[in-house]
Image (cartoon, grey):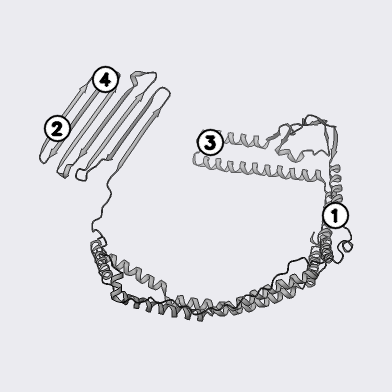
Amino acid sequence: MIQDLDILGKINTFYAKMRELIVKFEADKKVQAVLEKAVELIKQFKIEETITAVFNMVKDADIPTKFMQVFQGVINHLKSTEVKDIIQQLNMYIETIVQKLNSVNYNDFVDYANQIIAEYTAYLNGLIRTLEIPEKFEATRDFINVVSSSVRGLIERLKEIKIAEIIKSVKDVIDEVVLDNLKMFAEFVKQEITNLDVKDEITSYLRFVSKCYRRVTTIMTDMFSSMVRMIKEFLPEQKIINEIQQIIYGLITELKKAELIMPSLTIPLTDLVVPSMTFRMDKLGQFEIPTQLDIPEFTILGFYNVKATRISIEDIKQRIIELIDFIVNFDIKIPDVDAFFGDLTMSYLPSLPEITFPEITLPEISFPSLPQVPVDKLVKSLQVPEIKLPTIPSEIMVPCFGKIYGEIKFLTPIYTIKTSAEFQNSTENKMIPQFSGFLTSQATSPSFEILNYKLDSTARIAIPKMSRVVLAETLKFNHLALGVEHQASVTLYGLSGQAQTKTAVK
């Protein structure tokens, strides 16, 4: 197909046309100048040397080793020191920091800070000189200026070219690259459609589907036979195995004779009915493909009648070939470009202003020094407040139990039950720890009142000042035939105890 359509020749033709346009616009010279400047810029950047210098700086810093040393020192300190001692040391550090803040000398701090600023300023300036950052800025400026001038020159060249020449060049490229390829491809498609035997193609496809279906059923039969045979070897005297084998074989036999039924359907927006069809999967390759179709008279949208017609495969192929011929031979007449545009050029294109980036000067970095203030003025103008940081406690507070809750519901049209239980920490004063528990259950029935009941129960345990124990509980039960109210409490103090209870039954 590649040889018939001469694809390589068309690619060469397209390349030659584009080369001709590039030479006409002198774009190759502009691009060559930009690329040469880009190569100089890359050389000026010294990317390999810069990466090597940065890598050596990171390597000399030896950050991973220092980090691991600090990390290992922290681990060893935590292993060899008790938590209480760590907290005491931290409190000592906090007190030392507070003392140093109270006794700080502003002028000494200023001298130390200015010394650090001077060291880091010298380091940054040396790093800038090592990486040659000013030279790289200058090379970047030259590259941008070259690109700007190349674009400006290309636009000026375009303004001198006639519009008629551009249209002719584009038309030649379209004719030789697009239209000729389209015509050759259309002729190839027409030849393939002419030689195509639709009936044989569909029949071969149906035979392939039927063959695949028979292959699948054969594989399933072999697989189930092997499975049943293995089961018989382990369970030789089980009758159910033979029954399962008969069921499987019967199912596979029916699958081999399976029929695919396509129900009748009505074409949307019409009253045309397509009759139902039946296909046997094992004889799908023997299905007879009709060479023509008889379409009866039908109505579209209830008012437009279409007469009965007969359509054959050859008619469809001929209509497709006629459509391809119409598309290929469709001709759009273009007026004479020279007479229409004349000597009109693209002088209306805007002229780019001449832009030249100025020279970039990177001075040495310098940071201002902190000024010193006389002590007498500093004392009058700056009053350092008393600083007091909180002490870290050496005891750990752990939160206590809060609340646990559960609920069960049973809902039916004739009976409903709801039961819930809860146990919680109800302490209100830290001197009196207290826990409470609740149990509630209620049942209702719209049909049988004898099943209705309600149960409420509470229990409480308190330990005032951790010196005595108080237990109390209540229970209330209501039913159609029985009612119970019960209260009880017990107090334990040392080896003595006191209890009281009250119960009422109705």
- Label 1 CA crowd tier, 10 Å (few <14, some 14–19, many 20+): some
Mark 1 to mark 2 CA distance (whole Å): 112 Å
Picture disc at residue 231: none
Task: Check contact, mark 4 vs mark 1: CB within 8 A.
Answer: no
The residue under label 3 is 241
Front residue of this view, candidates 244 and 278: 278
Compare marks 2 and 3 and give the one earlier in the sequence.
Answer: 3
Residue marked by disc 2: 499
Left or right: 477 as drawn, with respect to 287: left
Q: Are marks 2 and 3 in contact (CB under 8 Å)?
A: no
Lower sequence index among marks 3 and 1: 1
User: Residue flagged by tag 4: what amino acid is it?
Assistant: Leu
Helix, strand or loop at label 3? It is: helix
Circle 4 residue: 482
> In the figure, is residue 28 to the left or right of 223?
right
In this view of the protein, which residue sits in the foreground, 361 or 211?
Answer: 361
The CA span between labels 2 and 4 is 26 Å
* Residue 286 drawn above or below residue 372: above
Mark 3 vs 4, N-terminal side: 3
> Label 3 neighbourhood size at 10 Å, few (<14), some (14-19), many (20+)?
some
